[in-house]
Image (cartoon, helix red, strand yellow):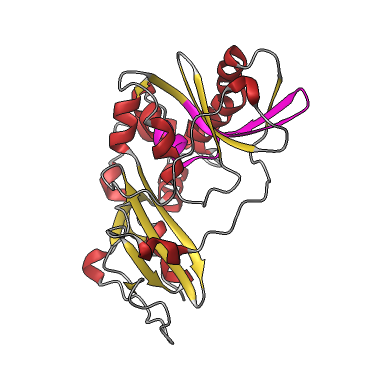
Amino acid sequence: MVTAKELLSNWRRTTCVKYKKGSVMIDEDSEDVNKFQKCFKLVDKKNLRDGVLYQYIVSDKTIKLIPTTKTPEIGTKHDCLIRHFKEDDKILASGELIKKGNDITYSCISSLFISLMIVIYKEEKIERSKREEYKSNYEANIVKKEIEKYLKDYNIIYKKNIKNKKTKFNPEKLCKYKNPPKCLRYMKTKDCNTQLSNPDGPDCNAGVDFCSNLNIDVLPDVVIPESKYIYKKNIDIPKVKEYFKNKGKKNLTPAALNMYMRRDEDFDKSKFEKTELYWPILEN
């Protein structure tokens, strides 16, 4: 299990917030001491109000909650909440929940939960092909049992996503801080989405400085140099199928193909690998 200290040290969140002609990229990590909002006080689990959306974190000892109805859709709220736990507390889940009568509906929508699952995948040695199934079961069953331990008087219901109105966040407020966030960039929305998809993390030199360009007329395109391109080696499946077809093995399922690739003593994986561009995805 993951401790609060481990989770916080690995935590990073990049968000694109739409603004005027494009989007503002906000990149946060656990070392960014700025608070983009006032941290709410913890809510007593006995005093949950109907219709109020709460952010929760559940550990092996307790569940802690803060209201998030008026919270901007950036990750700092998770940072605020997790600091209420001791460093060695074992964190099991994070997300949102809402009460209606005797029902409490929860989801695991949380940047902190994504970081948690990444660590769990590694600890449990979950194969990539099985991670989505593992995550779905973890959210719907394991997290539910943990929440039921601490909210025993309620009927606990899992939902993948809870739709609830939140106050629209204006990133201009970040510019009013004495020390604005260190990675606050303004660019076209398509370029911001490209930065979000970068497996090595966003480039904090992309776009233009947000606070000094609030009224810019034209946002320049973000040009990614080829030296930053990320390539991956992938198996050329049609070529592999042709190889086994010539050995009399036709119409192989993906599972059967993997099995033969492992067992065939003459099969040299390196001869069937092809290098393909992984990031960025270039427009035709």
Q: From this viewpoint, is residue 94 visible? A: yes
Magenta stretch contains residue 107: yes
Please give left or right for residue 80 compared with residue 161 in the image: left
Magenta stretch contains residue 279: no
Q: From this viewpoint, is residue 256 visible? A: no
Please give left or right for residue 133 compared with residue 91 in the image: right
**Residue at x-position 35% and y-position 55%:** 27
* Of the pair 131 and 211, the residue shown nearer to us: 211
* Residue lying at the far bottom of the rendered structure: 217
The quarter of the rendered structure image containing the N terminus is: top left
Picture mark count? 0
**Residue at x-position 44% and y-position 56%:** 15
Residue 274 appears at what percent x and percent y? Answer: 32, 55
Please give left or right for residue 142 compared with residue 215 in the image: right
Residue 101 appears at what percent x and percent y? Answer: 78, 26
- Tell me the quarter of the picture where residue 168 sits: bottom right
Residue range highlighted in magenta: 93-117
Position above or below: 163 against 89: below
**Residue at x-position 44% and y-position 38%:** 78
- Tell me the quarter of the picture where residue 87 sits: top left
Residue 142 appears at what percent x and percent y? Answer: 56, 19
Position above or below: 280 against 265: below
Position above or below: 235 against 136: below
* Of the pair 147 and 134, the residue shown nearer to us: 147
* Residue lying at the far left of the rendered structure: 227
Residue 245 appears at what percent x and percent y? Answer: 47, 44
**Residue at x-position 76% and y-position 22%:** 102
